Image (cartoon, rainbow, N blue to C red):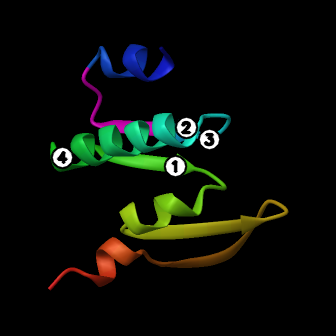
Amino acid sequence: VAIARALSNSPLMILADEATGNLDSKSGQEILALFDELNAEGKTLVFVTHDERMVQRCTRIIRLRDGLLESDQPGAKARARP
């Protein structure tokens, strides 16, 4: 419901905090597929997550530890670009 509400205004950027948290694997995969579609439409997605499945979908990965920047690197999607 929260995702549908957020998309109702056609935002250019979507902030997702633990979007796949507490979901079964099928529902989590459906959310990830939706995010892939939104990104293909040109929307920017910012994830806060512990779900490593999202890493393959990212062009940039920023990791924090105890509120401090631990790393900032290109994601798998960025490295795969020609």
Amino acid at dot 2: Ala
How many residues crowd mark 2 within 10 Å: few (<14), some (14–19), many (20+)?
some
Q: Is residue 36 above or below residue 34?
A: below
Q: Which residue is mark 1?
A: 47
Amino acid residing under circle 4: Gly
Q: Which residues are magenta?
A: 10-15
First in sequence: mark 4 or mark 1?
Answer: 4
| Earlier-in-chain disc, 4 versus 3 | 3
State yes or no: discs 4 and 1 in contact (Cβ < 8 Å): no
- Mark sitting earlier along the chain (1/2): 2
Q: CA distance from mark 4 to mark 3?
A: 21 Å
Which circle, 4 or 3, is nearer the viewer?
3
Closer-to-camera residue (80/67): 80
Q: Which residue is mark 4?
A: 42
Which residue carries the number 2 mark?
19
Q: Earlier in the sequence, mark 3 or mark 1?
A: 3
Q: CA distance from mark 3 to mark 1?
A: 7 Å
Query: In which quarter of the view is residue 35 placed?
Result: top left
Q: Marks 1 and 2: CB-CB under 8 Å?
A: yes
- The crowding category of the residue bearing disc 3, from other C-alpha atoms within 10 Å (few below 14, some 14 to 19, many at least 20), is few
